[in-house]
Image (tube, rainbow, N blue to C red):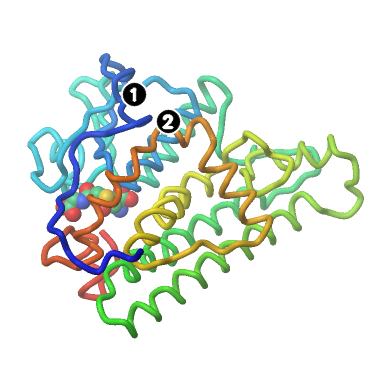
Amino acid sequence: MVSKTDSGKMYRNECTGDALETVKSHTEDQDLTLFGSCFCPFVQRVWVSFEYLQIQYKVHEVDPYKKPKDLLEVSPKGLVPGLKLNNFHPPRALNESTVILEYINDLAVTSNGRSLLPPTTNPCNITDARALVRLQCDHVNRSLVPSFYRYLQAQDQDSQIIGGKEFHESIECLVELLERTEKEVVRIGGVSGAGERKALAVGLGLWIPENEEDLGLVDVMAGPWLYRATNVLKQYRGFELPRGEKFNRWTSKLFNHPSFKRTCNTEDLYLDSYERYAFNRPNTSQVANAVNSGRGLP
Ligand SMILES: N[C@@H](CCC(=O)N[C@@H](CS)C(=O)NCC(=O)O)C(=O)O
């Protein structure tokens, strides 16, 4: 049943379920502190990556709408995620989910060899694999993420229909980019053996059938919104993700991946936290304000 009445629920401030267990096991001081909020998909991008890349971190849950001083010190607009680099004196900081992602990926490559990206060199001299992944991620940021919020914030029936169509088209366009990458990088002429295909698939993420457990950058970039589509958009807009066999296999591998699951809260937390977007309450967030005024997301 689609929820049609605003019950006035507020966003939550503390993780639940698997995510709560992960918070509890990351309370000790480390070189890196992740400033996060339980409901935030931009934070989840970074959090999943920390888990997957096996980098030590501490989690510090903050309320980004109250803008505590310690958050403003690491993130000038008071947005989560923020990352504090405690091993500098005085400590340094980074903000912006995509920037933090690149930073911790570089750190992993040099410290333990793990990565969310294809290597800079690979067995068949494919030089554009990394660029194709970045093209996918660019689409996620420029189209998938804004269309998720436009759809969720749309209030009248006509704009909800348009919003649903746009979000759906954006997913289809992402699928086209995933297919293109698979075709150009993995299914190339002369490559037939499973071992060779597997080597070429490194860093391309779970879309590629060979990659059962290897997350890629696009998985962590898009996953949090696709996941919220299955609970928040379903509850408030009656939305269903596309049903193709390959698409289902991808999202199921992604949502059940241990690194992803460890950052997921119970469903009630998402439904409560996003009710304010679904009814487009005034001053819900900087993201919501940007969507309402037609500006780019913060
Ligand atoms: N471009 C930022 C966006 C982060 C963002 O908007 N985070 C939200 C929570 S999901 C936030 O901190 N909102 C606080 C506010 O609106 O004041 C990123 O990618 O890190």
Q: Tell me which corner region of the image, top left, top right, bottom left or bottom right, holds residue 242.
A: bottom right
Q: Establish if 236 lies above or below 69.
A: below
Q: Is 95 displayed left or right of 201 in the figure?
A: left
Crowd rating for badge 2 (residues with CA inside 10 Å; few <14, some 14–19, many 20+): some
Q: Establish if 23 lies above or below 126.
A: above
Total marks drawn? 2
Q: CA distance from mark 1 to mark 2?
A: 8 Å
Identify the residue at image location x=85%, y=38%.
194
Q: Which residue in the protein does label 1 denote?
A: 21
Locate residue 217, reporting x and y percent: 53, 44
Locate residue 42, reporting x and y percent: 34, 47
Q: Quadrant of the N terminus?
A: bottom left
Crowd rating for badge 1 (residues with CA inside 10 Å; few <14, some 14–19, many 20+): some
Q: Establish if 2 lies above or below 9.
A: below
Instruction: Name the element at disc 1.
Output: helix
Identify the residue at image location x=39%, y=20%.
56
Q: Amino acid at mark 2?
A: Arg
Q: Amino acid at mark 1?
A: Glu
Locate residue 248, reporting x and y percent: 61, 53
Q: Quadrant of the C terminus?
A: bottom left
Q: Which residue in the protein does label 2 denote?
A: 262
Which one is in front, 242 or 74?
Answer: 242
Question: Quick one: which residue is furthest to the bottom in this view?
Answer: 158
Locate residue 24, reporting x and y percent: 29, 20
Instruction: Name the element at disc 2.
Output: loop
First in residue order: circle 1 vs circle 2? 1
Which one is in front, 273 or 34?
Answer: 273
Identify the residue at image location x=65%, y=61%.
244
